[in-house]
Image (tube, rainbow, N blue to C red):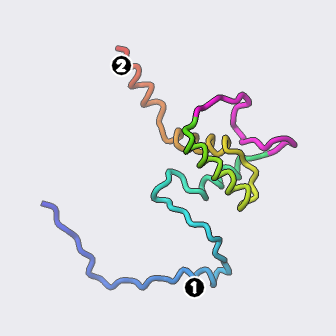
Amino acid sequence: MRKIIKEKGPTQRSINPKLVAKALSAEDTGIVIDTKRVPISLFALRQFIADRLYSTGGRPKLKGTRKVRNKISFFDEDWEKLKAIAGYYKEKEGINVSSSQIASALIHAEISKIKISIIKSKSRSALK
């Protein structure tokens, strides 16, 4: 039987975010991010793209991506979301990024969580 631990000590009073913002001379950006529902937050995605997007005079490119474009089929609602995210970054952040570059960054963020060695070892054991 597990023992339930109950905190009985005094609680700390909450800090008013407006006071913190005032003390730091910060201003509200109006951006609301629901990090509980998305795999990667818009801010993290923005940082990823801003750190890797560069231009050599033509269309901006993400560092480390292939020169050859691969075709990927998207569901209509997913493509609309990608276009909306790209539009948001262009309009609000001044980052000229395409819907495909947003898709590339999101795919990279999720695929990087998969350990390929586990997949390879499982496929080898299936062949035996």
Q: Which residue lies furthest to the left in this view?
A: 1
The mark nearer the N terminus, 1 or 2, is 1
Using the rendered image of the protein, determine whether residue 44 is visible from the camera's viewpoint: yes
Going 57% across and 82% down the picture, which residue do you hit?
18
Q: Is there CB contact under 8 Å for labels 1 and 2? A: no
The disc at residue 101 is: none
Task: State left or right for residue 122 relative to residue 69.
Answer: left
Q: What is the three-letter code of the residue carrying label 2?
A: Ala
Q: Residues within 10 Å of mark 2 (few under 14, many from 20)?
A: few
Q: How crowded is mark 1: few (under 14 residues within 10 Å), some or many (20 or more)?
A: few
Q: What is the three-letter code of the residue carrying label 1?
A: Leu
Q: What stretch is highlighted in magenta?
A: 55-73
Q: Where is residue 70 in the image (x, y as percent from the top left)?
A: 65, 29
Distance from the alpha carbon under mark 1 to that under mark 2: 60 Å
- Give the vertical position of 98 relative to 125 (above or below): below
The front one of 111 and 2 is: 111
Q: Which residue lies furthest to the top in this view?
A: 128
Mark 1 secondary-structure assignment: helix
Residue 71 covered by magenta stretch: yes
Residue 65 covered by magenta stretch: yes
Mark 2 secondary-structure assignment: helix
Q: Mark 2 points at which residue?
A: 126
Q: Which residue lies furthest to the front in this view?
A: 76
- Secondary structure mostly taken by the magenta-highlighted segment of the chain: loop
Q: Position of residue 11 (x, y in %)?
A: 35, 83
Q: Where is residue 57 in the image (x, y as percent from the top left)?
A: 87, 43
Using the rendered image of the protein, determine whether residue 48 is visible from the camera's viewpoint: no
The front one of 125 and 49 is: 49
Q: Name the residue under label 1.
A: 19
Question: Which quarter of the rendering shows the C terminus?
Answer: top left
